[in-house]
Amino acid sequence: MNRRVASLALAVVVFASLVVEMRHRNRDEFAELQRLTAQRDALDTEWGKLLLEEGTWSQHRRVEAIARTRLGMATPTARQFVVLDLRSTGAKP
């Protein structure tokens, strides 16, 4: 009878220590999950800001204004247009 009680007590102690260990791991993993979730949210916010910035930088008005001011580009006049008829030259499209 004494052996049974001792073995049951040992089993209880082993299982209790396993429960404590698993709860500790669970808390650590949950803390890591919370940290990664916060990091993901921060990255999502940054991604949204970058998309807005990209949209701002690529607006047609802005590109056209830079082309005119920095590069000296202008819309060609009707006289500056040249139309080529590739069918009459025998060139293949």
Image (cartoon, helix red, strand yellow):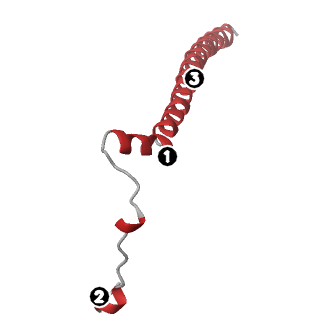
> Residue at horizontal 48%, vertical 38%?
54
| Quarter in which the N terminus is drawn | top right
Secondary structure at numbered mark 1: helix
Q: Are marks 1 and 3 in contact (CB under 8 Å)?
A: no
> Residue at horizontal 43%, vertical 43%?
63
State the residue in front, 10 or 79. 79
Q: What residue type is labelled 2?
A: Ala
Q: Mark 2 or mark 1, which has the lower sequence index?
A: 1
- On the image, numbered disc 3 is attached to which residue? 33
Q: Closer to the camera: disc 1 or disc 3?
A: 1
State the image coordinates of residue 13 (x, y, percent, origin top left). Answer: 62, 9
Q: Are marks 2 and 3 in contact (CB under 8 Å)?
A: no
Residue 11 position (above or below residue 58): above
Q: Distance between the residues labelled 1 and 3?
A: 42 Å
> Residue at horizontal 50%, vertical 36%?
56
State the residue in front, 65 or 21. 65
Q: Are marks 2 and 1 in contact (CB under 8 Å)?
A: no
- On the image, numbered disc 1 is attached to which residue? 60
Q: What residue type is labelled 3?
A: Leu
State the residue in front, 38 or 46. 46
Dividing the picture into quarters, in which one does residue 85 lie?
bottom left
> Residue at horizontal 54%, vertical 34%?
52
Dividing the picture into quarters, in which one does residue 80 lie?
bottom left
Secondary structure at numbered mark 3: helix
Q: Distance between the residues labelled 2 and 1?
A: 34 Å
- On the image, numbered disc 2 is attached to which residue? 91
Q: Mark 1 or mark 3, which has the lower sequence index?
A: 3
State the image coordinates of residue 10 (x, y, percent, origin top left). Answer: 61, 11
For label 3, count other residues whose C-alpha is less than 10 Å away and answer few (under 14), some (14-19) or many (20+).
few
Residue 47 position (above or below residue 9): below
Q: Distance between the residues labelled 2 and 3?
A: 64 Å
